[in-house]
Image: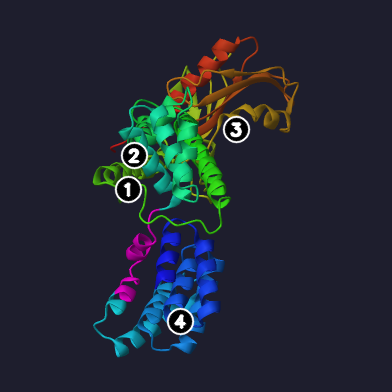
Amino acid sequence: MAVCAHATALISAGRHAEARSVVEAALEADGPEPVLFLALARAHMAEDEDDHDDEAERVFRRALDAFPDHLDLLAGYAELCLRSDALDRPGRHGRGPVLLERLRELAPDSPQLRRATASTSVLAAAASKGPSAARVQRHDAVHALTTAASPRAAEKEARRQAALAPYDQRLAVLDATLTTLARPGRAPLRFLIRRTPEYLFVAQLTVAVLLLARHVLGPFPLWVACAVGVLLDLPLLLLRLILRGARARGGERASGEAVMGPAPAEPALPAVPRYARRESALIGAGAVIALGAVATTSVLTHAEYTAYPRYEAVAPNTFRGMTRTDPFEALGVEMPRDPSRRVEASFTYFYTGGTGDGSNLAVVGAAGDFHDFTAAMVHDTDIILSSTAGVTRLHDTWSADAGPYGGWMQCSRYVEDITGTPKAICFWADKGSMGSVTFKASDMPHGEIAQLARLTRQSVLRPVPSDS
């Protein structure tokens, strides 16, 4: 029992390897004992690693071969099995219910059975493992900084306690942590370690507001919100790296002390409590806000991306003194249908009979779902035009203002190959329409060509109200 008590104290101090050495020496000297086997298995389980869990299982099996009905061994083995990963270790996990049933047969009302049964709860299993090393380190550092008169005083007190118990890993880690945090210029990090939940909540709220502001105040690049989130996370990342380094230095220093140094009779530092309700509320609220903002902005961004303006074709019978003719109606044929079903209406109109440079105007277009159109699709039309049969001597190409309907417009001058007539063509596109306007333009300047194209576009298309 004395050896088991000593091993338990070593495990509590984080000296798992020493605990195993003590128990193994006792087993070799005194022979098989159930409590020693259990202590050895617990020392392996305390490592919380797959290899040590495998070793713990081997210890339990060896012990149960010698003591098949020992309640503490059965309960300990059941806990190990029930807390194992059902996907990673299906065989071990499946042995848990069998061990529970054996405990029910031997001692239906025993505390061993109640403890093993509680292991079926994931939350209970997580709680039974105790706080993580990072959680213990943060708690100890915050407690020392809060209770001491100054960071320097906290550092001196931690160094004094670590010198009195050099084998204690927790004290060594606290000493290394405060040595780092107490340096000049690290007040922001000391503030951050004391107010991590609050800082995390504010950071998540800030990113959430930026994500939602894109849809309220006006569009701005999504990377802006992402960049702000990364910048706000940098102090937390720096703090995590500093704390991780301190844990490593403290653990190495404690391990380098006397291998069989005395374990502390009682903890020199206060027990680490669970997260306070306020901390849990802040962390939970921040996570909910962040996830809600990401989900909302994803839905809204998708809706904005797939949205497109609706138009209907309303070409007038006359335009600038010219009369409209519909070649498909004249031929008695229907417009070809779009197999992708993205085109809701298409049209081809010729306007003839007028005089001046605006005569013989042709407009070809379509209205529908073109939400994935980009400016490049319009700006590359000069390449399409130059490779079109009947078009030679492409003079110049320029981008033009698309007008009230928005989108993009690009115009070009060219010479018709068959007639030698100088003409102009303007392509337009937005998320809900696309088309081109072609007309004779012998000496029209760029501005007049673009203006005529815009007027034509506005004459043959009419926006449909969103509620219709």
What amino acid type is highlighted by mark number 2? His
Q: Could you tell which of marks 3 and 1 lies nearer the N-terminus?
A: 1
Crowd around label 3: few <14 · some 14–19 · many ≥20 (10 Å): few
- State if disc 4 and disc 2 touch (CB < 8 Å): no
Which residues are drawn in magenta? 115-131
Question: Is label 4 in contact with label 1 (beta carbons under 8 Å)?
Answer: no
Q: CA distance from mark 1 to mark 2?
A: 9 Å
Q: Dot 2 corresponds to which residue?
A: 143
Q: Position of residue 410 (x, y in %)?
A: 59, 23
Dot 2 alpha-carbon crowd within 10 angstroms: few under 14, some 14 to 19, many 20 or more: some
Q: CA distance from mark 3 to mark 1?
A: 68 Å
Q: Nearer the viewer, residue 262 or 212?
A: 262
Asked whether disc 3 touches disc 1, contact meaning CB atoms under 8 Å apart, the reply is no
Q: Are marks 1 and 2 in contact (CB under 8 Å)?
A: yes
Circle 1 crowding by C-alpha within 10 Å: few under 14, some 14–19, many from 20: few
Can you identify the residue that label 1 sits on?
Answer: 270
Residue 33's label in the rendered image is 4
Q: Nearer the viewer, mark 4 or mark 1?
A: 4
Q: Which picture quadrant has residue 210?
A: top left
Residue 234 is tagged as none
- Amino acid, disc 1: Pro
